[in-house]
Image (cartoon, helix red, strand yellow):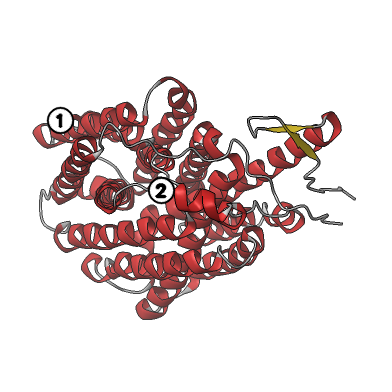
């Protein structure tokens, strides 16, 4: 039986830095690697769910005999679930070890995903989508927070690796759906396979102990002296997440249907178009692991916003070109890939990563994720509709406005208090 025991056996030098003894240090690093890998697996599962949703919209509409206008209510209720789950997560992760929460949520999400393709009533489908939204946000908020608690101010490459894992799942899901449609003319088997894959990280997380909330370890005098970012700066950071997330999620959920409506792709190749986006997204997040070591968070985010803006302009100008649809879908996947994890890195630099603030970020982002896809759903049935491109473009412009605000608000004398180099997991054996 694997012995996954976390140790606190360490010494401290005069500067207060943690120096682990040789045996304890090796064991601790092994535990951290396994725990980090487990979070990566969980984010692959999260990506599978997100990547499967967009290509399944036509099938959901057919199963429930609904129009696209009606089926767009799924986005609204999914976002309601995300909002509810984000509030819940901020409460739970302060009181319950995070890994225990993740185990329960992953199991429930696998069950929900397995039921989705067999539901034939729209409002029953809506209810289940709402519950799955709660589970998704609980994982999303939790692992973004737990990863920072685990790695402290060394989190940047691990955060990008976490979100790269999301890209792997999102890239894979449309391929699974395309093969299911090709072989059975239905999405059932795709969702059942995804449900099984979601359960893979459960045994690891069940065995491992959670990282310690640094707020529980901070000395009262340290906490009172810690420099906090201004509320206005936090508000601008949240604004960035609202609109950047709105751009990313709106495009991913509707590019499959947009491709079908354009007449350039059929059902199977539309799934491949979605997967092409997620493939570029995955490559972008992989490269982001290295870029986060070489460039500042500001530089990476501006590269994402400007690149995405120019890509969408090309899509509007050459809307009648099939190859532009494919090339620009790929390019946009690459440009939006690193925005969210880099935003989380920026939040860490501003000392703005706690379970409650992360929860608030996801609550706010869910509002845009609810509204933007719904707007697209109201107009996408119209002939030659470019509503998807316009809505995504407006979201990116507003994300740029938020980043300008952060740049000018942030005072030169404001220096965020760095988090500890390491946040040690709980000193408890899992035997």
Q: Sort mark 1 into few (<14), some (14-19) or many (20+) by Cα contacts within 10 Å.
A: few
277 up-or-down from 377: above or below: above
Counting from the top left corner in percent of width and height, residue 66 is at 28, 72
The local secondary structure at tag 1 comes to: helix
Counting from the top left corner in percent of width and height, residue 99 is at 65, 58
Counting from the top left corner in percent of width and height, residue 214 is at 58, 51
Query: Badge 2 is on which residue?
Result: 352
Q: Nearer the viewer, residue 159 or 265?
A: 159
Query: Badge 1 is on which residue?
Result: 314
Position of the C terminus by quadrant: bottom right
Look at the image and tell me whether residue 145 can be seen. Answer: no
Q: Sort mark 2 into few (<14), some (14-19) or many (20+) by Cα contacts within 10 Å.
A: many
Whichever of callouts 2 and 1 sits on the residue coming sooner in the sequence is 1
User: For this view, does 55 lie left or right of residue 116?
Assistant: left
Q: CA distance from mark 2 to mark 1?
A: 36 Å
Q: Nearer the viewer, residue 38 or 422?
A: 422
Place residue 370 in its image quadrant: bottom left
User: For this view, does 341 lie left or right of residue 176?
Assistant: left
Residue drawn at x 28%, y 62% is 367
In front: label 2 or label 1: 2
The local secondary structure at tag 2 comes to: loop
Q: Nearer the viewer, residue 242 or 58?
A: 242
| Residue 198: mark in rendering | none
326 up-or-down from 73: above or below: above
Residue drawn at x 53%, y 52% is 221
Look at the image and tell me whether residue 28 can be seen. Answer: yes
Counting from the top left corner in percent of width and height, residue 59 is at 38, 62
């Amino acid at each position: 039986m694997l012995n996954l025991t976390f140790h606190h056996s360490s010494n401290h030098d005069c500067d207060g830095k943690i120096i682990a003894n040789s045996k304890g240090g090796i064991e601790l690093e092994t535990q951290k690697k396994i725990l980090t890998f487990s979070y990566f697996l969980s984010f692959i599962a999260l990506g599978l769910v997100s990547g499967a949703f967009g290509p399944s919209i036509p099938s959901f509409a057919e199963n429930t005999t609904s129009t696209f206008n009606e089926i767009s209510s799924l986005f609204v209720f999914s976002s309601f679930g995300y909002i509810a789950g984000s509030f819940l997560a901020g409460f739970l992760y302060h009181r319950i070890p995070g890994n225990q929460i993740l185990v329960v949520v992953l199991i429930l999400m696998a069950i929900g995903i397995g039921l989705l393709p067999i539901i034939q009533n729209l409002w029953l489908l809506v209810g289940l989508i709402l519950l799955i939204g709660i589970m998704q946000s609980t994982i999303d908020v939790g692992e973004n927070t737990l990863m920072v608690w685990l790695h402290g101010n060394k989190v940047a490459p691990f955060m990008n690796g976490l979100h790269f894992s999301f890209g792997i799942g999102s890239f894979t899901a449309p391929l699974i759906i395309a093969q299911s449609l090709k072989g059975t003319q239905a999405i059932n088997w795709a969702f059942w396979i995804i449900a099984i894959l979601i359960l893979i990280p459960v045994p690891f997380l069940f065995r491992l102990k959670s990282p310690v909330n640094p707020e529980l370890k901070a000395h009262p005098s340290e906490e009172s002296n810690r420099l906090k970012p201004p509320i206005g700066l936090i508000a601008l950071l949240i604004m960035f997440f609202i609109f950047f997330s709105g751009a990313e999620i709106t495009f991913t959920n509707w590019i499959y249907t947009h491709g079908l409506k354009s007449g350039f792709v059929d059902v199977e190749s539309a799934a491949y178009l979605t997967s092409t986006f997620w493939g570029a997204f995955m490559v972008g997040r992989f490269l982001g692991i290295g870029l986060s070591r070489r460039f500042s968070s500001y530089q990476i985010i501006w590269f994402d916003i400007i690149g995405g803006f120019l890509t969408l302009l090309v899509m509007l100008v050459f809307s009648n070109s099939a190859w532009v649809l494919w090339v620009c879908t790929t390019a946009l996947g690459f440009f939006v890939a690193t925005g969210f994890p880099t935003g989380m890195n920026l939040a860490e630099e501003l000392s703005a990563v706690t379970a409650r603030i992360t929860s608030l970020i996801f609550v706010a982002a869910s509002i845009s994720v609810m509204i933007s896809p719904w707007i697209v759903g109201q107009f996408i049935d119209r002939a030659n509709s470019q509503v998807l491109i316009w809505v995504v473009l407006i979201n990116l412009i507003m994300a740029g406005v938020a980043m300008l605000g952060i740049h000018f608000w942030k005072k030169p004398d404001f220096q965020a208090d760095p988090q500890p180099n390491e946040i040690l997991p709980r000193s408890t054996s899992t035997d």
